[in-house]
Image: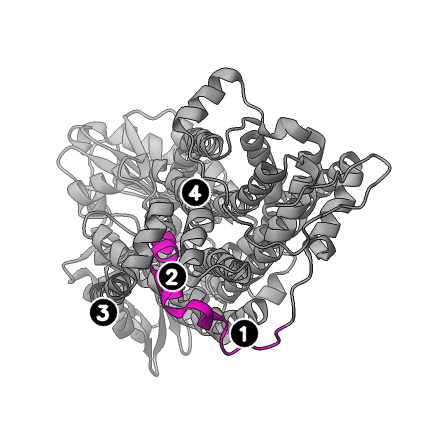
Amino acid sequence: MQRLGHFIVRRRVVLLVLTAAGVVVAAVFGGGVAEHLSSGGFDNDSFESSRTEDVLTEEFGSGTPNFLLLVTARDGNVDDAAVRERGLALARELDADQQIGEVVSYWDQNASPLRSTDGDQALVVADVLGSHDDVDDWVSEHAERFTIEDDVVVVGVGGSAQVFTEVGEIIEQDLLRAELIAIPLTLILLLFVFRGLVAAALPLGVGLVAIIGTFLILRLVAGFTEVSIFSLNMTTAMGLGLAIDYSLFIVSRFREELAAGRSADAAVVRTVETAGRTILFSAVTVAISLAALLVFPLPFLRSFGYAGIAVALVAASAAILSLPALLAVLGPNVNRLAVLRRPPKPPSEGVWHRVATVVMRRPLPVATLVILFLLFLGSPFLRLELGLPDDRVLPEDAASRQVSDDIRENFDSNEAGAIQVVAEDVGHPLARAGEIDAYASELSTLDGVARVDARTGIYQDGEAVLSFFDGATLTDGGGLGDRFRAESATWWSVVPDLEPVSPEGEALVHEVRDLDAPFDVLVGGEGARLVDSKAALFDSLPLALILIASAMFVLLFLAFGSVVVPLKALVLNVLSLTASFGAMVWIFQDGHLSGLLGFTATGTLTSTIPILMFCVAFGLSMDYEVFLLSRIKEEYDASGDNTAAVALGLERTGRIITAAALLISIVFFAFATARVSFMILFGLGLAIAVLMDAFVVRGTLVPAFMRMAGRWNWWAPAWMQRIYDRFGISEAGPETPAVDLTPDLELPLGSDGIGEKAGSR
């Protein structure tokens, strides 16, 4: 790192020119990244539900219903001739489209579940075929022409395809609004932190480089695999957040070195050697934490892994290379345009020094009380229920949300939430018609089933309300059975009378899959997607946790040569997440603040969000842990006094960590102003996690545990010490003090004797 510092000083202009050129290139080629990203990513081709979808498409030209029209009669009811004519025309118009698979309407089937209870509304249900991008493109192009208001009918567009198209559009709008909120507020707060306009502007510059650079990387990745549009929110939030974190440490250390009497060039070298090394380790830990998302089989989570790795490494590169080069050019001018300037206090008089001293006088009682408090806040997480996003993630005034709410309130069944049961290679349907009939009848008796449609008829409560099979002859039922016809395959549509994406919907899927069938069957649909995605998440979770824990342990050991420090860091980082995870359930699953925050509680949390939040928040927690421990270790190596090193290290980093936490929480709070509920959850949950970690864990548990461990903090077995001596990454000790405000620092002595005199550095 020292050699890198000298290189930066010598090549400062070249580095700045390359940075500017890179930003321009990234802006040109990565600026339109949103157009190449997907609004899906919540399933995988290997899932049973996905295989069911593939068979439906290949064998029947059908699929999971994802597009529907809610037709409301202006006067009278949907059986009036004029309304019937309009409904049939809409169904024919959809059916004529090459990208539309199966189309089912009330007027074709005359099936009562497709008619509202009061008779003034009816449904046309269809499936748009193709990938998520194909479906999104079709909906964006055609949905508007099916939104109709005239003298005869009012037609609203709904279904999952329309919902997620609207989600993507709203996300883009929310992203722009969040940036317009976050950036000015961040600049104002940075002015208070740095007390100078020049220094305050530097983190925003690094953030710009990180965000635009990551957009380019995501654009390149999207050329090879599916990348979720939701990852843009994390790119912007993490880009600003990490840029602020890293810039705070670089700029603060640079100004500290200038205050110690170093020249600008020497200050840059020393800053890169110390703060740069810490940032490098921090970025690697954040990247590894988010890389764990790549083990999950869902493109949605993997997308955040791609974005997280990219933004951490780009932000670190800009902070370690471009920012020091700019500081070398600015020199003392970094302090120009000062505002609210005041002389720094001696470390022994600082707030965090006093906090650490108080905590270390009674470390065990303090640690016990704080841990109990965190566990209490986290207790709601024990009743976590996972679900998938549906129309209720949208605000109540969204068009597709209003259509879905009407259907929930006015219809007895959920046509768009139908479970598809597919049987391949059953032979000629006539030869197996009796078994098809019996199986459909049995499916219709399951709790939560409103109706079963099959090749042999339509069934309710174990009875055929409309039969196409008389025991010897199989008809097409006036065309109603045609959609189930294939050369040697058939399928059943199990229409529920409950919410498909819910614990009750999951239970119904399990019942269908557990029911003895006369054929080998595949079960799909929205409820099946939820079951499959949860199973995939839980199967992959142990590997992700092992990778995060083992990688963090190895990195921290190589950084500090201790086995105690990594173990303590892992435990404290998990504890720091308990409050935010409890808040997720209490606020969003239980809905306690739904009115204030403007979302609809569904009794579940989007299944991917807790895992995503864990990886992001764990990485940020480790980020602060590395910052703090690096400075404590630096002080300990200089003085050999563990207690003094903890207090002084916390004082020298506490203000910066606090400022960084406040700033990044402002960014996350800005993103919590979104109108899509799981993005509100993402922003608010991470803001709570960051603040809890910076103020509670770093301020109390870290000094308490390090005080109790004493010199054992830096212990490792002899064989591991030999590994550290050979492969550990350490820095040379300082040639001169970074800043020496109190040559003979003396902590207040308590009755337990903490606060030995630290020798002058």
Amino acid type of the residue tagged 1 in the rendering = Ile
Q: Earlier in the sequence, mark 1 or mark 4?
A: 1
What colour scheme was applied to this rendering of the protein? one colour
Q: What residue do we see at 50% from left, 79% from top?
A: 337
Count the marks: how many?
4
Q: Earlier in the sequence, mark 1 or mark 3?
A: 3
Question: From the viewer's perspective, is the residue at label 1 or at label 2 nearer?
Answer: 2
The residue to which callout 1 is attached is 188
- The quarter of the image holding the N terminus is top left
Q: Nearer the viewer, residue 680 or 414?
A: 680
Using the image, tell me which numbered label, if any, was put on residue 281: 4
Amino acid type of the residue tagged 4 in the rendering = Phe
- The quarter of the image holding the C terminus is top right
Label 3 residue SS: helix
The residue to which callout 2 is attached is 323
- Is 421 located above or below residue 151 in the figure? above
| Horizontal side of residue 361 vs 473, given as left or right | right
Q: Earlier in the sequence, mark 1 or mark 2?
A: 1
Q: Earlier in the sequence, mark 2 or mark 3?
A: 3
CA neighbours of label 4 inside 10 A, class few (<14), some (14 to 19), many (20+)? many
Q: What residue do we see at 28% from left, 73% from top?
A: 144
Whether pointer 1 and pointer 4 mark residues with C-beta atoms closer than 8 Å, the reply is: no
Magenta-tinted stretch: 315-341
Question: From the viewer's perspective, is the residue at label 4 or at label 3 nearer?
Answer: 4
Q: Earlier in the sequence, mark 4 or mark 3?
A: 3
Q: Tell me the CA gap for discs 1 and 2.
A: 20 Å
Q: Residue 446 location, x and y as percent?
A: 46, 36
